[in-house]
Image (cartoon, grey):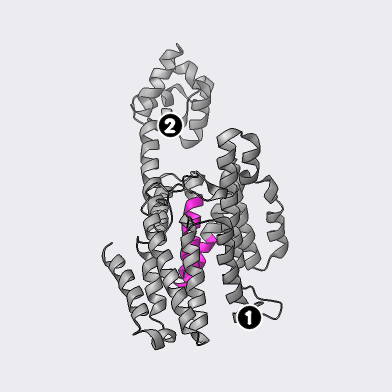
Amino acid sequence: MSIGTTIKTLRRGRDLTQEELAEVLGVSAKAVSQWENDRTAPDLSQIPAICTYFDISADTLLGIDTAQRRKVRDELFSAAQKLAQTGHHREAAEAFSTALARFPDDFEIMNFLNYSEFVCISQGLYPAEEARERREDCIRRNERTLAACTDDRLRYPAIASLATCYAEDGDKARAEGMIARLPDMAEARNFVMPTILSGDERIRAEQWLLFDVLHYIRRRMMWNLKNDDDRDFYSREEMAEKHRKVLALFDLFYEDGDIGFFHNDVQDAHLHLAVYEAENGNMDKALDHLRLAAESALAFTDYCRGEPYVHTSLLFRGLDNRGDQVSRNTPDTNVQEVLHVMAQGVFDGIRRTPAFEDITRRLTVSADGQ
């Protein structure tokens, strides 16, 4: 239905003449007649008045099928999100950008586009000048989100992102002002949700809270930040000890190899320790860590296939935590990562040993079978 036909139908539904509607809208009767005969269309500035008077949405007036529009939006969003979840962030950024062009006021699309572009920037996937331009675009979209979006779920990521950008640009005061707008950790959804639940729902919420806390503790344990003299705070030996502590932390939280998602982190810790031990001439220990890294890589590959994964460990017993939503490039990414590390020259002294060759064979078979 055209705009003119819609206006005519609405006018007749109110039992109005063209002259009466023209008076209400502050236009001439001739203008209303031309609208209804599809000779002209209302100016953009007149759309709100028409919608308000007839109590309809702009979509209805413009003849937009809201359900079909939502379907198109969701299809574009889901396709872009799948690219992001599988680690194809550059392609995801382009897909979210295309979706945003179709739906320019969709703050959720803006949020995901910003995330994908920041990942691409951090991974050096854009040339320097393009990276700067895209970063500025992200800042503008986040500032627009804060100015116009009322959904805290989307406002908080925008605040966090802006705080980081302002700090990187040397505006510490503005960054701190942004951070002050975020809730304290104890007021965050993950912490508050369990308190409003009971029974099995509360048990699962508490388990997910422990899972999230463990995830972020592990990440921060592995950072080696610079001190005021721009030097690493931790030495190589201390970083190796931190990786050992990470492994001990997982042993504390999980029993009998029931690690699931965290096989990815266990693999990472063993790889770092394998390199460290090899550099120090401890080849037997290096081989042990490579073997354990390979086992974790293979276990994580299985986990990411998305089959049901129900934890048996005391702290997470009964938690269904399948891995089909883990963001990664290809199913064998972790296997290839271990093989890449094993190709380093530091392992040349043990490359031809049966143990090393066996690890290589198992990983290669897995990679070729994907």
| Kind of residue at disc 1 | Ser
Q: Would you say the magenta stretch is mainly helix, strand or loop?
A: helix
Q: Is residue 234 left or right of residue 24?
A: right
Rendered residue at 65%/77% (across/down): 234
* Residue marked by disc 1: 235
Note whether 114 is above or below 336 in the view shown.
above
Task: Residue type at mark 2: give it.
Answer: Asp
Choose between 226 and 4: the one closer to the eye. Answer: 226
Is residue 124 highlighted in magenta? yes
Residue 167 x, y percent position in the rendering: 65, 65
**Residue 288 vertical position relative to residue 302 in the rendered view, above or below:** below
Residue at 39% x, 20% y: name it. Answer: 8
Q: How far is mark 2 from mark 1, CA to CA? A: 61 Å
Q: Which mark is residue 59?
A: 2
Task: Please say whether residue 26 is visible from this viewpoint.
Answer: no
Q: Secondary structure at mark 1?
A: loop
Residues shaded magenta: 111-136
* Classed neighbour count for the residue bearing mark 2: other residues with Cα under 10 Å, few (<14), some (14–19), many (≥20): few
Residue 142 as seen in the image, left or right of residue 229: left
Residue 31: x and y in percent read 43, 26
